[in-house]
Image (spheres, rainbow, N blue to C red):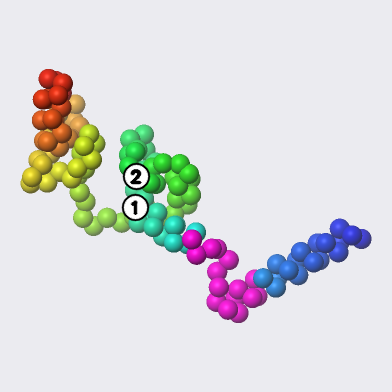
Amino acid sequence: LRRVREAVVSTQSTGFRRTNFELHHLHSDSLLSTLLQSGLSVIKTHQCYSSERSGDCPVCNEPLNTLASSLPFSHCTQSRLICRISGEVMNEHNHPLMLPNGHVYGERALTEMMEREGVI
């Protein structure tokens, strides 16, 4: 009898909570969760779930990667090339250069690597 009473109270409190949220146009998710998810969906790309994850991307790192797994990928109408070595944008001031292995890096990063280590 006690378990039945607890189940009824639990069902009533859940119903009250749902009705209260609907009446006052509230969401059951917290505002922080909603804002975090909308921010993550803006920067989430397919690379975030590949073997070539970026250390600087919040979505590529745990625990945000798990949180963003159910969110849609961002739609990017204009893309930018980012050098994996330096993290700088590759543009007319930092030309993209492709190595024989097919990887593309920024001219500045390759020049600095050549000066520092003598080889690429």
Q: In the image, residue 49 lies at what x, y percent?
A: 39, 41
Q: Are marks 2 and 1 in contact (CB under 8 Å)?
A: yes
Q: Is residue 52 left or right of residue 89?
A: right
**On the image, numbered disc 1 is attached to which residue?**
43
Q: Amino acid at mark 1?
A: Ile
Q: Residue at x 34, y 44 (%)?
A: 57
* Name of the residue lying farthest toward the top: 118
For the view shown, which residue lies furthest in the front direction?
A: 116
Q: Which residues are magenta?
A: 18-32
> Looking at the rendering, in which quadrant would you find the N terminus?
bottom right
Task: Answer left or right for 62 relative to 81.
Answer: right
Q: Residue at x 60, y 79 (%)?
A: 23
Q: Which residue is mark 2?
A: 57
71 versus 103 height, above or below: below
Residue 78 vertical position relative to residue 59 in the rendered view, above or below: below
Residue at the image position 24 percent from the left and 36 percent from the top:
84
Task: Locate the C terminus by quadrant.
Answer: top left
Q: Is residue 22 magenta?
A: yes
Q: Residue furthest left?
A: 92
Q: Quadrant of residue 114?
A: top left
Residue drawn where x is 86% and y is 58% of the image = 3
